[in-house]
Image (cartoon, rainbow, N blue to C red):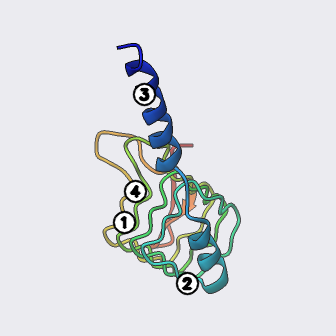
Protein backbone atom coordinates (compact mmCIF):
# COMPACT_ATOMS: atom_id res chain seq x y z
CA UNK A 1 0.00 0.00 0.00
CA UNK A 2 2.86 2.39 0.77
CA UNK A 3 4.22 1.91 -2.76
CA UNK A 4 0.97 2.97 -4.46
CA UNK A 5 1.47 6.72 -4.12
CA UNK A 6 5.09 6.76 -5.36
CA UNK A 7 4.16 4.57 -8.32
CA UNK A 8 1.29 6.87 -9.26
CA UNK A 9 3.55 9.93 -8.91
CA UNK A 10 6.25 8.39 -11.12
CA UNK A 11 3.69 7.32 -13.74
CA UNK A 12 2.14 10.79 -13.80
CA UNK A 13 5.55 12.43 -14.17
CA UNK A 14 6.51 10.12 -17.04
CA UNK A 15 3.20 10.77 -18.82
CA UNK A 16 3.41 14.52 -18.35
CA UNK A 17 6.96 14.79 -19.65
CA UNK A 18 6.36 12.56 -22.68
CA UNK A 19 3.03 14.15 -23.56
CA UNK A 20 4.44 17.57 -24.32
CA UNK A 21 7.85 16.84 -25.79
CA UNK A 22 8.53 17.32 -29.50
CA UNK A 23 10.72 14.97 -31.52
CA UNK A 24 14.05 16.75 -32.20
CA UNK A 25 14.42 14.83 -35.48
CA UNK A 26 11.04 16.17 -36.61
CA UNK A 27 12.05 19.74 -35.75
CA UNK A 28 15.30 19.37 -37.70
CA UNK A 29 13.41 17.88 -40.65
CA UNK A 30 11.00 20.83 -40.67
CA UNK A 31 13.76 23.42 -40.53
CA UNK A 32 15.87 21.64 -43.19
CA UNK A 33 13.16 20.73 -45.70
CA UNK A 34 9.96 22.63 -44.83
CA UNK A 35 8.16 19.30 -45.07
CA UNK A 36 7.09 17.66 -41.83
CA UNK A 37 3.84 15.85 -42.47
CA UNK A 38 2.44 14.09 -39.36
CA UNK A 39 5.42 15.25 -37.28
CA UNK A 40 5.42 15.59 -33.50
CA UNK A 41 6.16 19.25 -32.84
CA UNK A 42 4.31 19.56 -29.52
CA UNK A 43 6.04 22.13 -27.30
CA UNK A 44 8.47 23.17 -30.07
CA UNK A 45 9.71 26.77 -30.09
CA UNK A 46 9.01 28.04 -33.60
CA UNK A 47 8.80 31.70 -32.57
CA UNK A 48 9.48 33.88 -35.62
CA UNK A 49 10.42 30.96 -37.87
CA UNK A 50 9.76 31.32 -41.61
CA UNK A 51 7.51 28.38 -42.48
CA UNK A 52 6.08 29.87 -45.65
CA UNK A 53 4.65 27.08 -47.86
CA UNK A 54 5.72 24.44 -45.30
CA UNK A 55 3.88 21.11 -45.28
CA UNK A 56 2.65 20.48 -41.73
CA UNK A 57 -0.32 18.33 -42.69
CA UNK A 58 -1.42 16.17 -39.77
CA UNK A 59 1.33 17.54 -37.51
CA UNK A 60 0.92 17.65 -33.72
CA UNK A 61 1.46 21.31 -32.80
CA UNK A 62 -0.29 21.65 -29.45
CA UNK A 63 1.75 23.71 -26.98
CA UNK A 64 4.02 24.91 -29.83
CA UNK A 65 5.14 28.53 -29.79
CA UNK A 66 4.33 29.81 -33.27
CA UNK A 67 4.28 33.49 -32.31
CA UNK A 68 5.40 35.74 -35.17
CA UNK A 69 5.86 32.68 -37.42
CA UNK A 70 5.31 33.08 -41.14
CA UNK A 71 2.92 30.27 -42.07
CA UNK A 72 1.61 31.94 -45.21
CA UNK A 73 0.72 29.34 -47.82
CA UNK A 74 1.52 26.52 -45.38
CA UNK A 75 -0.38 23.25 -45.40
CA UNK A 76 -1.89 22.72 -41.94
CA UNK A 77 -4.59 20.29 -43.12
CA UNK A 78 -5.51 17.97 -40.23
CA UNK A 79 -2.87 19.58 -37.98
CA UNK A 80 -3.65 19.61 -34.26
CA UNK A 81 -2.98 22.92 -32.54
CA UNK A 82 -5.16 22.14 -29.54
CA UNK A 83 -5.04 19.52 -26.82
CA UNK A 84 -7.46 19.27 -23.92
CA UNK A 85 -4.67 18.27 -21.52
CA UNK A 86 -1.93 20.60 -22.70
CA UNK A 87 -1.49 24.30 -23.24
CA UNK A 88 -2.66 25.26 -26.70
CA UNK A 89 -0.49 26.48 -29.57
CA UNK A 90 0.36 30.17 -29.49
CA UNK A 91 -0.12 31.85 -32.88
CA UNK A 92 0.11 35.43 -31.61
CA UNK A 93 1.07 37.74 -34.51
CA UNK A 94 1.49 34.75 -36.84
CA UNK A 95 0.72 35.01 -40.55
CA UNK A 96 -1.57 32.26 -41.85
CA UNK A 97 -2.61 34.08 -45.02
CA UNK A 98 -3.28 31.58 -47.79
CA UNK A 99 -2.67 28.63 -45.43
CA UNK A 100 -4.67 25.42 -45.82
CA UNK A 101 -6.48 25.00 -42.49
CA UNK A 102 -8.94 22.34 -43.70
CA UNK A 103 -9.80 20.07 -40.76
CA UNK A 104 -7.08 21.67 -38.61
CA UNK A 105 -7.96 21.41 -34.92
CA UNK A 106 -7.70 24.88 -33.42
CA UNK A 107 -10.29 24.69 -30.65
CA UNK A 108 -13.13 22.80 -29.04
CA UNK A 109 -16.52 24.47 -28.89
CA UNK A 110 -16.68 24.59 -25.10
CA UNK A 111 -13.00 25.00 -24.24
CA UNK A 112 -10.27 27.52 -24.88
CA UNK A 113 -8.35 26.88 -28.08
CA UNK A 114 -5.22 28.01 -29.89
CA UNK A 115 -4.19 31.59 -29.15
CA UNK A 116 -4.98 33.67 -32.23
CA UNK A 117 -4.12 37.18 -31.03
CA UNK A 118 -3.50 39.61 -33.89
CA UNK A 119 -3.21 36.57 -36.17
CA UNK A 120 -3.74 36.89 -39.91
CA UNK A 121 -5.78 33.88 -41.04
CA UNK A 122 -6.03 32.23 -44.45
CA UNK A 123 -8.53 34.68 -45.95
CA UNK A 124 -6.37 37.66 -44.93
CA UNK A 125 -8.54 38.82 -42.04
CA UNK A 126 -7.09 39.34 -38.55
CA UNK A 127 -8.37 37.56 -35.45
CA UNK A 128 -7.95 38.77 -31.86
CA UNK A 129 -8.89 35.61 -29.95
CA UNK A 130 -7.06 34.95 -26.70
CA UNK A 131 -5.37 38.35 -26.41
**Upstream in sequence: badge 1 or badge 2:** 2
Image quadrant in which you'd find residue 120: bottom right
Q: Relative to 127, say whether 124 is above or below.
A: below
Report the residue marked by disc 2.
53
Report the residue marked by disc 4.
106
Q: CA distance from mark 4 to mark 3?
A: 34 Å
Mark 2 neighbour class, 10 Å CA radius: few under 14, some 14 to 19, many 20 or more = some
Q: Quadrant of the C terminus?
A: top right
Q: CA distance from mark 3 to mark 1?
A: 37 Å
Q: Tell me if I can see residue 51 in this picture.
A: no
Mark 4 neighbour class, 10 Å CA radius: few under 14, some 14 to 19, many 20 or more = many
Q: CA distance from mark 1 to mark 4?
A: 6 Å
Q: CA distance from mark 3 to mark 2?
A: 46 Å
Which residue is found at the position 49% from the left and 81% from the top?
Answer: 55
Instruction: Single out the mark in the foreground, 3 or 1.
Output: 3
Circle 3 sits in a helix, a strand or a loop, which is it? helix
Q: Residue furthest top?
A: 2
Circle 4 sits in a helix, a strand or a loop, which is it? loop
Report the residue marked by disc 1.
104
Q: Is residue 78 left or right of residue 23?
A: left
**Upstream in sequence: badge 2 or badge 4:** 2
Image quadrant in which you'd find residue 49: bottom right
Q: Tell me if I can see residue 102 in this picture.
A: yes
Which residue is found at the position 49% from the left and 65% from the top?
Answer: 40
Q: Measured from the top left, where is residue 111 in percent x and y?
A: 35, 39
Q: Is residue 39 left or right of residue 111?
A: right
Q: Measured from the top left, where is residue 8 in percent x and y?
A: 40, 27
Q: Measured from the top left, where is residue 66 in percent x and y?
A: 60, 60
Amino acid sequence: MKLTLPIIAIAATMFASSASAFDPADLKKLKDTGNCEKCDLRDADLNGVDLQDANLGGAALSYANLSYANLSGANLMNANLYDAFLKNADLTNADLSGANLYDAILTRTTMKGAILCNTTISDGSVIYSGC
